[in-house]
Image (cartoon, helix red, strand yellow):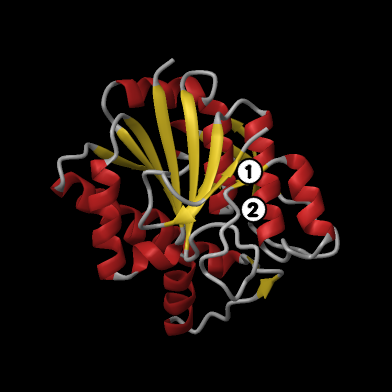
Amino acid sequence: MEKLTVIKVGGKIVEEPETLSRLLADFSALPGYKVLVHGGGRSATKLAAELGIESRMVNGRRITDADMLKVVTMVYGGLVNKNIVAGLQAKGVNAMGLTGADMDVMRSVKRPVKDVDYGFVGDVKQVNADLLAGLIRQGVVPVMAPLTHDGEGHLLNTNADTIAGETAKALARHFEVTLVFCFEKKGVLRDADDDDSVIPVITPDLFRRYVDEGVIQGGMIPKLENSFSAVEAGVRQVIITLATALDGRSGTVIKK
């Protein structure tokens, strides 16, 4: 089976000129088929403030009302996405920016209101993997923005980690997929204050143990749950590492 790498990078990395230019160089150098999924939260928060729109977060997730939806659509689907696409084209990578609405590539359903009303936020329900795989085999490199649609004309703000996970799972039928989550640490750390205390491999048993012991906590728990669900669904491996280590040779590997 042909290999494919799905890279997820946080907004912070694609929003700063220096880190973006390093990312574009590293991503361009990756061999084989690849997909890039990006965030853009800081830029959205900044533009919203300039427009007098308040940003509200609950548990690190953005509440997306009608005004905020306009902002994230402009920032994620426009400014951030097209900057990356133009940068990759300059490096000879035939990138194509996509939201979930483009070619109906990813459809979601508006998150039901339970304890919190997140507003126009989508939970992914289907991915058009055949279409994506066809594009990829033609030499197109998809650059996915964290926006989906509901099939009824509404765009929905959708977590970029989720987009990366669902894309990787769907493409696992067509390719041998490695999913790489890039963030500001070298991997999952045994000790939050020691940047070199990277846990090299995490299996489901180790994960439960680390959570019980309080080694793994906070936002890292959902990231790892996402990772295990990807591996269960046929993704070969998930790597959590620094944005400057896209080749997956360092960091934490998540395996069955």
- What residue is drawn where x is 62% and y is 65%? 64
Residue 217 seen: yes
Q: What residue is disc 2 on?
A: 223
Q: Where is residue 70 in the image (x, y as percent from the top left)?
A: 49, 63
- Proximity of marks 2 and 1: CB atoms separated by less than 8 Å: yes
Asked if residue 121 is positioned above or below residue 105 in the image, the reply reads: below
Residue 14 point in image, percent of width and height = 35, 62
* Mark 1 residue type: Ser
SS of the residue under disc 2: helix
Question: Mark 1, residues whose alpha carbon is within 10 Å: few (<14), some, or many (≥20)?
Answer: many
Residue kind at label 2, given as amino acid type: Lys
Residue 83 placement, left or right of 118: left
Residue 25: image tag: none
- Front residue of 249 and 25: 249
Q: Mark 1 points at which residue?
A: 227
- Whole-angstrom CA distance, mark 2 to mark 1, is 6 Å
Residue at 71% across, 69% down:
59
Residue 98 visible, this angle: no
Instruction: Note whether 150 is above or below 3 in the view shown.
Output: below
Question: Considering the numbered disc 1 on the image, is that residue within a helix, a strand or a loop?
Answer: helix
Residue beneath the point at 64% across and 53% down? 223
Residue ID at (38%, 52%)? 245
Please determine whether, in this image, residue 39 is positioned above or below residue 140: below
